[in-house]
Image (cartoon, grey):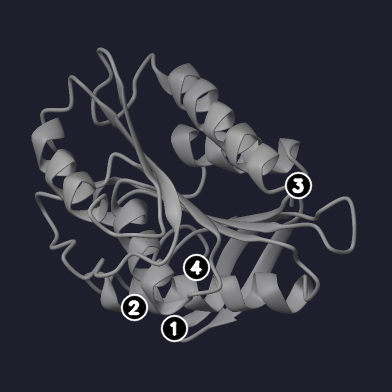
Amino acid sequence: MPEVILPGASGRIEGRYSPGKRPNAPIALILHPHPKAGGHMNNPVAVTLHQLFVQRGFATLRYNSRGVGKSQGEFDSGIGELADAATALDWLQTNNPAATQTWVAGYQFGAYIGMQLLMRRPETDGFISVSPPSNMYDFSFLAPCPASGLFLHGTADTVVPPVEVERVVNKLRTQKGIVIDYELEEGATHFWQDHVGAVERRVGAYLDKRLEEKPA
């Protein structure tokens, strides 16, 4: 897939872009784990998410947030990273003005940034949040959550115990008009070692279900 360079608030943003196969292809933005913990766009979970959307005909972009890889700038504790995500989604929408659907998918810190982006972009149709760090960041901004989506977590996650994610899910499920799926993968840790295949299987099945309900 071709490398793309986007103009961001802190300079260039490095990305990998897979165009859709038709002019009105749906679009998907993929967000990577925490930069200070070695997170980057080529993380296996991020790459798997990217491939899942590409396989379903989405125009898909994943990118390095500021200070990661060839992306300029420095880590900004989430504020600048949210600006980068908005820039990346703007670029996707500009290059795909006839897109039928918009999805946001993130892993770990990327799930946190992705959910914040979701709140600012009501046109978003769905989200995927893998291992959201709900014990490290306040997710109360999801009030109300504007789209249905999937939370995927591991039962053996000791960094973010499942009960912490369940609190967020239970709160969101009280809202009308959206459906929150929550799936737990037995034995998977926060880093999904030896369980990346489960991400592919579970997220793929969820996307297929949603796309059957509302074709893109």
Circle 1 is placed at which residue position? Answer: 10
Sequence-wise, the earlier of marks 2 and 4 is 4
**Dots 1, 2 in contact, CB < 8 A:** yes
Sequence-wise, the earlier of marks 1 and 2 is 1
| Amino acid type at image mark 4 | Ser
Q: CA distance from mark 1 to mark 2?
A: 8 Å
| Amino acid type at image mark 3 | Met
Query: In the structure shown, which secondary structural element does the residue marked by tag 4 occupy?
Result: loop
Query: In the structure shown, which secondary structural element does the residue marked by tag 1 occupy?
Result: loop
As displayed, is residue 159 above or below residue 89?
A: above
Image point (74%, 63%), residue name: 100
Image point (46%, 27%), residue name: 199
Q: How many marks?
A: 4
**Dots 3, 2 in contact, CB < 8 A:** no
Question: Which-is-in-front pick, marks 1 and 2?
Answer: 2
Tell me, for residue 103, which label it has, or none: none
Image point (35%, 52%), residue name: 111
Query: In the structure shown, which secondary structural element does the residue marked by tag 3 occupy?
Result: loop
Q: CA distance from mark 4 to mark 1?
A: 9 Å
- Residue 107 appears left or right of 56: left
Circle 4 is placed at which residue position? Answer: 71
Instruction: Answer with the quarter of the image where residue 151 lies.
Output: top left
Q: Residues within 10 Å of mark 4 (few under 14, many from 20)?
A: many
Question: Which-is-in-front pick, marks 2 and 4?
Answer: 2
Q: Residue 165 location in percent, x, y?
A: 18, 42
Q: Residue furthest front?
A: 176
**Dots 3, 4 in contact, CB < 8 A:** no
